[in-house]
Image (cartoon, coloured by chain):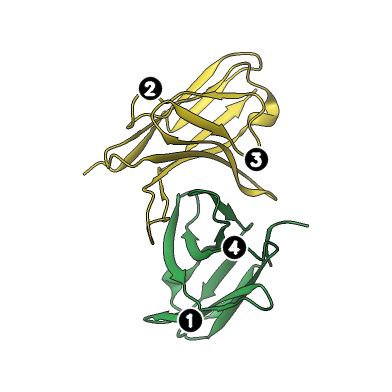
Amino acid sequence: DAGITQSPRYKITETGRQVTLMCHQTWSHSYMFWYRQDLGHGLRLIYYSAAADITDKGEVPDGYVVSRSKTENFPLTLESATRSQTSVYFCASSEFGLEVETQYFGPGTRLLVL
Amino acid sequence: RKEVEQDPGPFNVPEGATVAFNCTYSNSASQSFFWYRQDCRKEPKLLMSVYSSGNEDGRFTAQLNRASQYISLLIRDSKLSDSATYLCVVNNNAGNMLTFGGGTRLMVKP
């Protein structure tokens, strides 16, 4: 009954390094999402995926890359981390259909870029 | 103008008080509305959906006013455990994408 998990939970990295945040869900939900949450901005959508091999940009995609080779995994990569990418990152999943737009969130990854 | 706007608060209320939050949204084509709750340093979790006719879940009542494009959440008989940030969320019918407000922080004091 794992639901949706994220790893690592905490990460400290340096400017310019590549970082990958992992997200795994056990419900076989079609949709998966990546958000970042910052003070003063609330939750902002980075990328989302409607199904395996289908991804699309959200509100703030610059500097991020995603892939979805398997339904259950949706990794987010910061190709060259910048200090402005210091944030809390949440992964979420949902199933498409009537009255099922509820998104279920993972516990978050706290990322600090020095 | 933000798509979903909320008063950030904090709202400081005593236990047992009734408190109400409002939220406005800019897209008149928005289809679905929700309130999520987020505890400090935790992930957001669905509190309740908001239906056109209004709906109630225990001490919580949600209302939707499409004409004025606002959503409200009323909490009666506040408990210490209600202390959290309440996120107003709107689905603009673009697939399963949700737009989140910045949240309203509630602090219930003994």
Which hue is chain A drawn in?
Answer: yellow
**Mark 3, residues whose alpha carbon is within 10 Å: few (<14), some, or many (≥20)?**
few
Rendered residue at 53%/19% (across/down)? A19
Q: CA distance from mark 1 to mark 2?
A: 41 Å
Is B38 left or right of A94, judged from the image as shown? right
Closer to the camera in the image, A43 or B65: B65
Which hue is chain B drawn in?
Answer: green
Subunit bearing disc 3: A
Rendered residue at 49%/65% (across/down)? B34
Q: CA distance from mark 3 to mark 2?
A: 22 Å
Task: Identify the secondary structure beneath mark 1.
Answer: loop
**Mark 2, residues whose alpha carbon is within 10 Å: few (<14), some, or many (≥20)?**
few
Residue that sits furthest to the left in the current view: A1
Splitting the image into 4 quarters, where does residue B7 fall?
Answer: bottom right
Which of the numbered marks, if any, corresponds to residue B30? 4
x, y percentage for residue B43?
A: 45, 49
Q: CA distance from mark 4 to mark 1?
A: 16 Å
Residue that sits furthest to the top in the current view: A17
* Circles 4 and 3 on the same subunit: no
Dot 4 or dot 1, earlier in sequence = 4
Q: Amino acid at mark 2?
A: Ser
Query: Which residue bears the numbered disc 2?
Result: A69
Which of the numbered marks, if any, corresponds to residue A59? 3
Subunit bearing disc 1: B
